[in-house]
Image (cartoon, coloured by chain):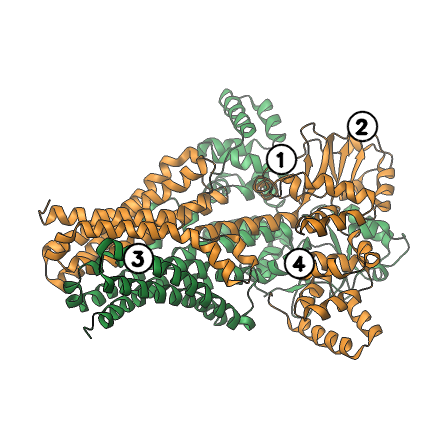
Chain colours: A green, B orange
Amino acid sequence: MSHISKRNRLVLDAIIRLHHRGASAPLKRILAKTHASDLAQILSLLPPNEALEVFHAIEDTHQAADCLSELDPELRERILRETPAEALFPVLHELPPDDLTDLIAEQDPELAERLMEGLDETSQEEVEELLQYAADTAGGIMTTDVFALPEDMSVEDAVEALRGLSDVEMVFYLYVVDTGKRLLGVISLRQLLLARPEQRLAEIMNPRVIRVRTDDDQEEVARLVEQYRILAIPVVDEAGQLCGVVTMDDIVDVIQDETTEDMLKMAGTDEAEMSTQSPLKIMQIRLPWLFAAFLGGLAATAVIDHFEGLLARLLALSAFLPIVMGMAGNVGTQSATVAVRSLATGHLDLSQARGYILKELWVGLMLGVIYGIALALASLWLFGDPDLGTIVGLTILTNMTGAAVIAIILPMVFHRIGADPAIATGPFVTTAIDILGVSNYFLIASVILKVL
Amino acid sequence: MSHISKRNRLVLDAIIRLHHRGASAPLKRILAKTHASDLAQILSLLPPNEALEVFHAIEDTHQAADCLSELDPELRERILRETPAEALFPVLHELPPDDLTDLIAEQDPELAERLMEGLDETSQEEVEELLQYAADTAGGIMTTDVFALPEDMSVEDAVEALRGLSDVEMVFYLYVVDTGKRLLGVISLRQLLLARPEQRLAEIMNPRVIRVRTDDDQEEVARLVEQYRILAIPVVDEAGQLCGVVTMDDIVDVIQDETTEDMLKMAGTDEAEMSTQSPLKIMQIRLPWLFAAFLGGLAATAVIDHFEGLLARLLALSAFLPIVMGMAGNVGTQSATVAVRSLATGHLDLSQARGYILKELWVGLMLGVIYGIALALASLWLFGDPDLGTIVGLTILTNMTGAAVIAIILPMVFHRIGADPAIATGPFVTTAIDILGVSNYFLIASVILKVL
């Protein structure tokens, strides 16, 4: 349920009115004039039964297809289940192969099979081909609708071919292939227009094509598209044959999804939470992440219990537990977040790891000195105990420095071993910093109070 | 210093070798064959002096311009300062107006003025026009190079005009305007190709153009481009006159920047940290955010000190401080992060605030019951004190529920009053949850131990 504009609110009201009145002709006219993306939003605000009826009133199959692929998954499933085949399949055939594949892949096996059986043979083959690629690879996000022509074709014939295209999603580039369908070069639509009609495509193409392999990770695809600022990137198989193309709008989805994944992992939950409304399911998603924090908390309890004698002697030590833990946790979150984001945007290169660690060491040390002195003075003023001031001051200094360094090292280690650096700021590691911090606090207290 | 590919590493080695040998002709050939974006990366890995010399060896001004706009800011400044005017300005004139404006705006006033004076009159006017818009608005990210033609022009003449374009960055759409330059419609390049030569543009254009105003926020621009999956969005002024266009590659930058900003604010720091290497500067950026946590920590200290008598009576209470605070903090971070991300991607609509709050209430309650019982049992097993078990169990239950609810409400409140919801998970609010949690803990202990 995203934010609804005033205009869409008016269209929604009109649709409800016309639909209730059974005014079919004006309803169809207003639907035809509304953008598919707006229609999807409007339908999601109607009761499911009415949404289904209004969807059936959309006459343009292309518009219906665009609308269908932007609907909420639940409403989409309902439409797929309850629309008669003769109305449904003309709409499905308007979908680009990648969207059609995603739509079928998200349904349960029985419905997915029913949908596959109703498709024409070409679509079936396209979907089957796309289904073999993992969802988070170039193959999984590409569309097979790609505008490719042989190298020896003339510009004139290529323009004719472009005119004849009907269902290619978005065309910006013309890819040039050899007789074995291997990718040779790329030509922008504008270059095509500028060329003389009799020129061969091989003469005007740019042979240095930035490309990805079907099994490349979608993050790598996004990185290349961002780096080279291209609108579409061709996808080839291991033999160099052109299989499809990933367009910029898919890249934006990849970037948003990867970021959501990072942010939710950093918070100690999962992107699955974004797509469910059920408190029970959300609870189940969060429960295991919190278990790490629970076990860590119990370990901290055991540490403190171990130093019971120390606490009994200087009760005020417990009053500083929240600030001693909080300051280290905060500086750790700062360092780790900068590291995770820098790794995700390609700003952090592991070959320079030593420099980054030294930098964080200095930052942690400076912040530790400043807040260590501040807390020592505050505690002296509150409790008038120089020993206590020394203890809390030294603890803040060492804990903040240590947390900053640990928090920069862990994301880099996770990245190096192929794990997701975002986990490095989740409850798991935050809790580890907590335990180390509490232990360090009581060790320093033991030394200063000569209890060891 | 982003990740460097094997291929770029080889090119880098070759460039170093050729440059040291003074082999100017082969160096120029290898530079000409390398993508501007790769060149920018390679130059950033050379010592600044050599990078400057290699940059001067790039012969194609267009390639040099592309490379210049992707360089590190420090190296770019050095090139701008130390390149003779007769070599520099042909390169600058190749930059699209928006990139040229960004480049000039980031220099200090003295250098910026020197650069402005060297530009030709047209470029000066374009830059001056763009400089008047705030950096985070549609006007601030648009380019003024826009392909617009009058409504009564024929398709044939439009194709001719397209052929004549030299410096328009990326063309996908042709915008149709009236004699007052007001935006009337849009035509894709493919529609232009498909039309009959004698048709007027007004006949084939799509009059429903999704557009933004120069003063619209860049986040709103990104939202529209994402929602409608368009490659470029035209920008108009208050009179409806076409001023420029924002292309998809700029949108990707906006999305990445806004996300970085969100993530770093959530961690209690600032995106300025990403662009500096100086530990002193980073320390200065983080210091004030940590001050909120410092003050909050002192407040928690005061709360605990206030309950000194209670602690003296039941010392084990202090051993549970880390887990009691940690569990609430973690569930709060989970809720707040989901809320912040949902608001940023338009998945959370304030009109349904009540539903979201109820959902989090249930999630917090369920997690609180489970972990409350778990901690009560663990404490009973560790300390054998039923009172202590009751206290920590009830505290976990109420703290987790409260934290989940506060953490969903605050981002929505921040969003409503126009502040950035991301701040709602920073140290400021985390600390507030800490203080409430500690207070609640000791209040429950007071009641159970009948000390009140």
| Mark 4 or mark 3, whichever is nearer to me | 3
Decide which of A10, B1 is in the foreground and name it.
Answer: B1
Secondary structure state at the residue bearing disc 4 = strand
> Can see residue B425?
yes
Which residue is disc 4 drawn over?
A: A244
**Amino acid type of the residue that numbered disc 4 sits on in the rendered structure:** Gly
Which residue is disc 1 drawn over?
A: B215
**Real-space Cα distance between discs 2 and 3?**
72 Å
Q: Earlier in the sequence, mark 2 or mark 1?
A: 2
Mark carried by residue A105: none
Decide which of A35, B384 is in the foreground and name it.
Answer: B384
| Mark 2 or mark 3, whichever is nearer to me | 3
Quadrant position of residue B48: bottom right
**Could you say where residue B121 lies in the image, as x and y percent from the top left?**
82, 43
In this rendering, do the residues under marks 1 and 3 share a single chain? no
Which residue is disc 3 drawn over?
A: A377
Q: Residue at x 87, y 59 (%)?
A: A200
**Amino acid type of the residue that numbered disc 1 sits on in the rendered structure:** Asp
Q: Chain of mark 1?
A: B
In this rendering, do the residues under marks 4 and 2 share a single chain? no
Quadrant position of residue A38: top right
A426 vs A16: above or below: below
